[in-house]
Amino acid sequence: MIKRYLPTRDSIKSNRWLRWLGPRIHDPQLWHINRNSVARGVAIGAFFGLMVPVAQIPAAAVVALALRGNLWIAAVSTLISNPLTYGPLYLFAYRLGRSLLPAETNSDVPAAQIEQVATPLHWLGDALHSLSVIGAPLLLGMALMAITAAVVGYFGIQVFWRTRVLLKRRRKRHARLALLRTHTSL
């Protein structure tokens, strides 16, 4: 089903933007839809989609090239975070990180500082201080979410794929047995 939306191997070979990658871009594992390459692609895409706030697709593509994950699946999986989900994801990451950090690094920005009328250059110092207070919990939460999403994505695809194959085999076996029963009863 998904294969019809993917570019052909020839169109990839002839693409002028991808020539610099040389023979590495023609590795079959990067393009084939199989259990292991898709699982690697989902894990890579989920990790970079949640961890890196900018250049997610290029970062996922470079790592997919190195780890031989499906390149297109890795790129599409980064879309787990998008303009509609940034706010809830980062809020959850901040709260997760804040709940795990020790109390001395776990302080919120004081309300008096937020309400303070800033002078023209004072706002920059306030912004940097706010980022330093928010930064550690946010980064910890993002890292934990990214690692968890990558692990769950990888093993989730492995289990889903294996279950799908087993169900398909079971249906074929039942169909053969039903056909055999109808032939023996005649």
Image (spheres, grey):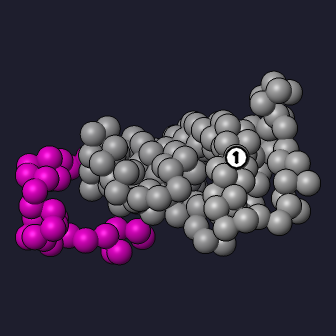
Considering the whole magenta stretch, tell me its main secondary structure.
helix
32 sits left or right of 81 in the view: left
Q: Secondary structure at mark 1?
A: helix
Q: Is residue 185 above or below residue 142?
A: below
Q: Residue at x 83, y 66 (%)?
A: 117
Quadrant housing the C terminus: bottom right
Identify which residue, 40 or 147, lies in the foreground. Answer: 147
Horizontal and vertical percent for residue 141?
69, 40
Q: Which residues are magenta?
A: 1-29
Identify the residue position indicated by label 1 in the image. 129
Residue drawn at (73%, 65%) of the image: 119
83 left or right of 54 in image? right
Amino acid at the residue labelled 1:
His
Vertical arrangement, residue 66 with respect to residue 17, above or below: above
- Residue 170 visible, this angle: no
**Is 98 covered by the magenta stretch?**
no
Image point (70%, 46%), residue name: 129
Quadrant placement of the N terminus: bottom left
- Badge 1: residue crowd in 10 Å (few <14, some 14–19, many ≥20): some
Give the camera-side residue of 55 and 154: 55
Residue 2 in magenta stretch: yes
Is 162 left, or right, of 22 in this rendering? Answer: right
- Look at the image and tell me whether residue 56 can be seen: yes
Locate residue 56, reporting x and y percent: 44, 57
**Residue found at the far right of this picture:** 112
For the point 83% across and 48% down, the residue is 109
Measuring from the top left, give residue 39's x and y in whole percent: 46, 44
Q: Position of residue 71 (x, y in %)?
A: 33, 55
